[in-house]
Image: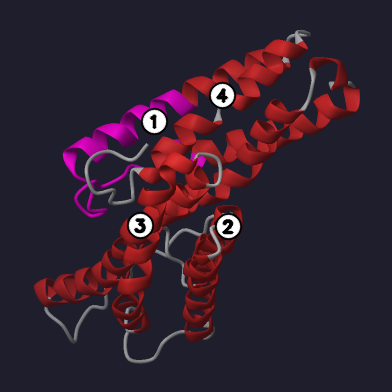
Amino acid sequence: MITRQPPVRFPSRSLSGMALLLAIGSAQAAPLDDMVAFDAIYIPALSMSSQASQDPAAVPKAQATLTALAQQWPALRQRLAATWGTEPPAGWPQTLASVGQHIDAAVGASGRSDWKHTHEALEPVRIRLMQARQRQGMDYFVDRLTAFHEPMETLALAGSTLKPAQVDAASRAKLEQAYAQARTRWLGIEQQPVDGVAYGLSPPRQAQLRKALDDETAALSRLSDALRDSDNAQLLKAAVAIKPPFARAFTAFGHFEGGLAR
């Protein structure tokens, strides 16, 4: 569940109205800017390591994005360590230490040309950071996508691994449950506008995000229709189809040199 930020309460004295607004704006911008800077480097490595595990042609780009993440992590870690101010919240140093360990593990796996484990080493990073941000009451749009990922992956995996004849009443019930969870979380995404400037999105990446969000909404609608139908083949096809637009939405927040994220 995504935790919303508590409302800002303005004291009646001690700071002038303008000074207070500047102070609040600075305090809110620092964590967001720092998280955006990290994701711009992390998301390409996460995405390309997944592609490299399936397509050898993606290995050079995966290696380049992972190298960029490993090289920039020390500076990013220093920046993130100070994002909440001089006294970091409980657990934040441990979260950053865990992120560093996962990056080191990913680098080690890539050195063995084991891109499957490279990707798996990077996956928990977004979960740990999401949980840390939620503890701080930070509503970060990328975390909404991360929360959607779990039920989305359940549906897409079933669609790609099950045969139509294997879809019985029990498996349909599981798909319906996963769909209900996914649709609820996607509604939270649809209701949260994205400030492209605040999230550092270039015009092409903003366009990529807008189209991906629209495509995902349409894909979920088709899946809803398929769940009400008896055609198992169409159901599985619709379940698989919800993953690509999600991936395009998520990767819009990564800075892929040389063009749009795939």
Discs 2/4, front: 2
Numbered marks: total: 4
- Say few, some or many: other residues with alpha carbon within 10 Å of mark 1 (under 14 / 14 to 19 / 20 or more): many
Q: Which comes before the other along the chain, label 3 or label 4?
A: 3
Where is residue 140 drawn, in percent x and y?
Answer: 40, 57
Q: Nearer the viewer, mark 3 or mark 2?
A: 2
- Name the front one of labels 3 and 4: 3
Provide the residue designation for mark 2. Answer: 114
Going by the image, does 257 lie left or right of 167?
left
Q: In this figure, which residue is indicated by the disc labeled 1?
A: 212
Q: Which mark is residue 65?
A: 3
Determine if the magenta segment contains residue 253: no
Q: Amino acid type of disc 3?
A: Thr
Q: Is residue 11 left or right of residue 235?
A: left
Quadrant in which residue 227 is drawn:
top right
Q: Amino acid at mark 4?
A: Ala
Disc 2 + disc 1, Cβ < 8 Å: no
Q: In the rendering, at what x and y percent does residue 98 appear?
A: 54, 77
Dividing the image into 4 quarters, which one contains the N terminus?
A: bottom right
Q: Secondary structure at mark 4?
A: loop
Magenta residues (range): 188-216
**Mark 3 crowdedness (10 Å alpha carbons): few <14, some 14-19, many ≥20:** many
Q: Residue drawn 30% across and 69% down?
A: 34
206 in magenta: yes
